[in-house]
Image (cartoon, rainbow, N blue to C red):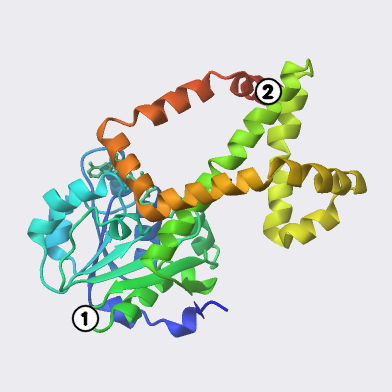
Amino acid sequence: MASIYYDDDANLDQLQDLNIGVIGYGNQGRAQALNLRDSGLTVWVGTKEGKGRTHALADGFPAHTPEEVAANCEVLALLLPDEVLPYVYSVSVEPYLEAHDTFVFAHGFTVRHKTLRLPDDADVVLVAPTGPGRQLRSLFEECKGLPALVAVEQDASGVAWQRCLAYAKAVGCTRAGVIETTFEEETVTDLFCEQAVLCGGMPELIKASFDILVDKGYQPELAYISCLKEVKLICDLLFERGIHGMRSAISNTAKFGSALAGPEIIDASTRYRLAKVLQAIESGKFARQFIEEAAQGSPAVHELLLTERHSHLARTGAKLSQNIRF
Ligand SMILES: NC(=O)c1ccc[n+]([C@@H]2O[C@H](COP(=O)([O-])OP(=O)(O)OC[C@H]3O[C@@H](n4cnc5c(N)ncnc54)[C@H](OP(=O)(O)O)[C@@H]3O)[C@@H](O)[C@H]2O)c1
């Protein structure tokens, strides 16, 4: 069984006398800064001019640059997009650092792939919430928490682990439970699951199934509802009850159909390709491709988004949502 830690294992005193700097005020930055402040900690928010700065000001955080935050805070949560982080770090953070800083990451990518050079005399910890900032914040406000993955890569202060757990407590995650891992394991499993299942595999299965039905002359509206909208019902069952519980809750026809079709679709060749996806992540090939893509202005991503925005599936969804109250 993995090692799991809760509120009682963490002590906010570890962070009480420190200035906590949150650099980036987007998805994770906003939620984490607000939760940290509501936990009674001293929080500085560092942003460039833009949407993040506007939101931070509206939430009552004074306008600070990343440079000011790096110079004044002992704990720095670097909550920027993974491809942007190395640049902001080298220009706006690294030159202003004091000794014995603690760096907090919400994902292991930049540390695992060494896209930035952190000082040897710093703590490097991971508090990776298992969901978006919106959920991290709303659960916190309900006195609940979102589970997180936690790890220590470097312990220069001797109390990096305690600081890591204290940070996880301050953003609300130890209320639910945090699982100990490594930067390596968090990075690989997170990237693999988003590519294989959540954002890669599942949407492609939806698109392909929609196209097959529509090409055969079935109404696109029906194809959209059954291939896309109903995914939520099954996801809710999976989330609450696991695969066995989901199967117990569906009709006998669906049970038999899934027993026949599932292994035919996800067969040995699919498993072979899944293993290749994992291999590309483990070897660093995916990270190199991602960094190169970002340096060129993300052309592959733009093309995918453009194609999907104008697809038959998207047009069907837009029309349906004007006419049916889901
Ligand atoms: N999103 C999630 O659900 C999630 C979940 C767990 C972990 N994480 C991890 O959390 C970290 C942060 O991701 P995120 O999703 O919160 O990112 P995000 O929402 O894309 O955050 C964007 C923030 O970065 C700022 N920014 C962008 N380019 C910048 C630049 N060149 N200089 C200074 N600031 C810049 C943006 O400012 P403007 O708004 O002004 O453009 C905004 O404040 C990542 O490591 C990610 O892997 C994310």
Numbered circles on residues, count: 2
Q: Position of residue 258 (x, y in %)?
A: 81, 45
Q: Nearer the viewer, residue 51 or 187?
A: 187
Image coords of residue 37 (percent x, y):
34, 65
Q: Amino acid at mark 1?
A: Ser
Q: Residue at label 2?
A: 211
Amino acid type for the residue under numbered disc 2 = Asp
Mark 2 or 1, closer to the camera: 2
Q: Residues within 10 Å of mark 2 (few under 14, many from 20)?
A: some
Q: Position of residue 182 (x, y in %)?
A: 39, 69
At which x and y percent is residue 197? 58, 47
Reply above or below: 68 against 20: above
Residue that carries the numbered disc 1 in the rendered image: 157
Determine the image quadrant of residue 53. top left
Left or right placement of residue 199 versus residue 263 in this view: left
Q: Secondary structure at mark 1?
A: loop
| Dot 2 and dot 1 residues touching (CB under 8 Å) | no
- Of 275 and 131, the residue lying toward us: 275
Q: Where, quadrant-wise, is the C terminus in this rendering?
A: top right
Q: Is 68 left, or right, of 176 in this rendering? A: left
x 64%, y 25%: residue: 317
Helix, strand or loop at label 2? It is: helix
Say whether residue 308 is visible.
yes
User: Is ligand 1 within 8 Å of the beta carbon of the residue shown at mark 1?
Assistant: no
Q: CA distance from mark 2 to mark 1?
A: 56 Å
Residue 326 in sight: no
In the rendered image of this protein, does residue 234 appear above or below residue 147? above
Q: Residues within 10 Å of mark 1 (few under 14, many from 20)?
A: some
Q: Earlier in the sequence, mark 2 or mark 1?
A: 1
Q: Quadrant of the N terminus?
A: bottom right
User: Which residue is at the front of the view, 197 or 168?
Assistant: 197
